[in-house]
Amino acid sequence: MNALGKTLALGLLISITILAPDGTESSCTNGNQTSQKGSLPEAKVSTTLFAQMGAEALLCCPAIPMTEAVLIMWFIASRDQPLCRISYKVETKEINKWYYCMDSRISWHSTPDPSLDLLINAVTLNHEGIYSCDIATPTANFQKSYYLQVLVPPAVTLLPGENRTAVCEAIAGKPAAQIFWTPDGNHVTKKESHSNGTVTVRSTYHWEQNNVSAVFCFVSHLTGNQTLSIELNQVTGVTITLQSLLIILYVKLSLLGIILLILGFVFFQKSNYFRK
């Protein structure tokens, strides 16, 4: 049997969900409810879950009736954290924790009925990792796994540069943002990776046409898109102002130098006169 056939035989399903800070994934099926027509869920389900930093993430166990479950276990292998394992014996209602399960942001999801789903409050980068709920019944085992990835929205800026340029930055985003310019022109884009997994993208745009009145920076990211614009006459005005200030400063320094030279010459002449 080929790899695809094995995957289908295991009943492996792959889906993607993105959670924003203003909501949680709350579509868990209650453990006391049966599936449609009494059928059981797939034996193994794998889900890639994207959660924006600061959001709440609800991780659901397989939809098995609580009366059919014998043992329920959560395995948590999050980013840079020791393995955490939590078990629940249905008959005795005994909860046990093995290894390191000290994260106070991870707790049982509270519902009117008994729930063994996990809720992560205010997701951080340290919560990235694999979460797996295993349910043992007298006849079979069921598993639902999550690969949780945390999204970080970048801070976006657009500032005038030198020599007819504009600089657009998407700072500390995860994953790296993409930057596009309108109208089309010459631009150079660079990426800087940070130790926490975020990336800063910096794009420098240069225009040559005198008839371009404004440029637009479009930043594309999984957490949302942003568009910034800048008037080119503002950039030119800034450049002219700086040049004017430099000229004024140069003239003042020149005049000051001439005055000091004259005063020095007069002082020297007076010194020679009194010596005679």
Image (cartoon, rainbow, N blue to C red):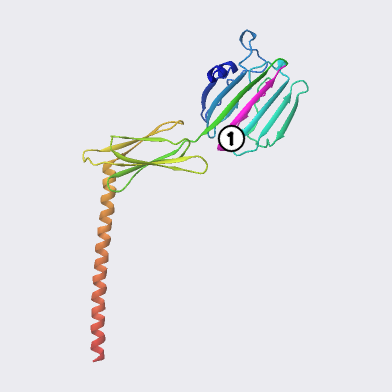
Q: How many marks?
A: 1
User: Residue 238, how many percent across, how many down?
Assistant: 29, 48
Look at the image and give the residue range highlighted in magenta.
Answer: 114-137
Read off the residue under disc 1: 127
Quadrant (top left/top right/bottom left/bottom right) for the C terminus: bottom left
- Residue at 55% from the left image edge and 37% from the top image edge: 125
Residue 124, given in percent of the width and then of the height, sits at: 56, 36
Q: Is residue 64 visible?
A: yes
Residue 216: in magenta span: no
Let me know if residue 120 is in the magenta part.
yes
Q: Secondary structure at mark 1?
A: helix
Name the residue at 44% across, 36% down.
176
Q: In the picture shown, does residue 195 fall above or below 117?
A: below
Q: Amino acid at mark 1?
A: His
Depicted 168 relative to depicted 91: above or below: below
Say whether residue 176 is left or right of residue 78.
Answer: left
Residue 183: name its quadrant: top left
Give percent across and percent down for residue 250: 26, 62
- Residue at the spot 44% in from the left edge and 31% down from the top edge: 224
Pick the quarter of the image with the N terminus.
Answer: top right
Q: Which residue of the protein is positioned furthest toward the bottom in this rendering?
A: 276
In the picture as drawn, the residue positioned furthest to the front comes out as 1
Name the residue rendered at 32%, 46% in the picture. Answer: 161
